[in-house]
Amino acid sequence: MNSPPKPGDFPIGSLESRTIARMRAERIRATQKRIEIISNVQRPHYALPPGTNNSMPYAHPWQEMKDGILMRIVYHPGEWHRVPVESVPVCSGCGTPFRKAERQVDDSVWFESDCVAKHVSDGSK
C-alpha cells in the first residue's frame, strides 16, 4: 500500500519535513467543523478591527472552541430608513450601496450591506 509521506520520513527540521507537517496541519484545519454567526448587531465586547466602522462588514478571526469546532462572528451591517428614502446608505470601506431588503415595517424599510464578500474571506484559512 502506498501511504502519504509523514514528517518523520525526513530529517528533523528539513524543508521536506516542515512542508509535509504544514500540509497535514492545513488539511486537518480545512476539515474542522465551523460555526459562523452572522449578525447585524455589533457585539459590545468585540472591538472594531482597525480601518472599519459601523457601515463596513467584517469578520472576527476564527477561534477554536473547547470541542475543536471553529467559530467566528461576521458583522453584516444594516439600517432602517423611513419611506420615502432620501439616500441609500453605502459601505464606508468600498462605497457599495446597501441593498433594500424585503423587510418593511409600517413606513420603514431595511437596507443591508451588499459587499460582505469584498470584505470577508470565506474563512478557509
Image (spheres, helix red, strand yellow):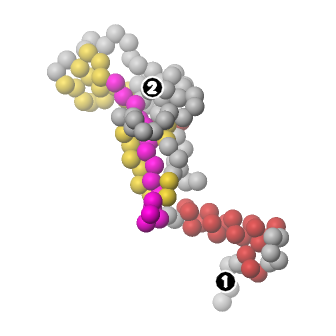
Inspect this view and state whether residue 68 appears. yes
Q: Position of residue 59 (x, y in %)?
A: 49, 41
Q: Residue at x 74, y 79 (%)?
A: 8
Residue type at mark 1? Ser
Q: Position of residue 93 (x, y in %)?
A: 54, 25
Residue linked to disc 1: 3
Residue linked to disc 2: 55
Quick check: is 66 in the magenta stretch?
yes
Is residue 104 toward the left or the right of residue 65 in the image? left
Residue 79 in the image: above or below residue 72:
above
Residue furthest to the top in view is 86
Q: Does dot 2 land on a helix, a strand or a loop?
A: loop
Residue 56 in the image: above or below residue 18:
above
Q: Which of 44 and 79 is in front in this view?
A: 44
Q: Position of residue 16 (x, y in %)?
A: 79, 70
Q: What stretch is highlighted in magenta?
A: 65-79
Inspect this view and state whether residue 117 appears. no
Is residue 80 toward the left or the right of residue 34 in the image? left
Please give the label number shown on residue 61.
Answer: none
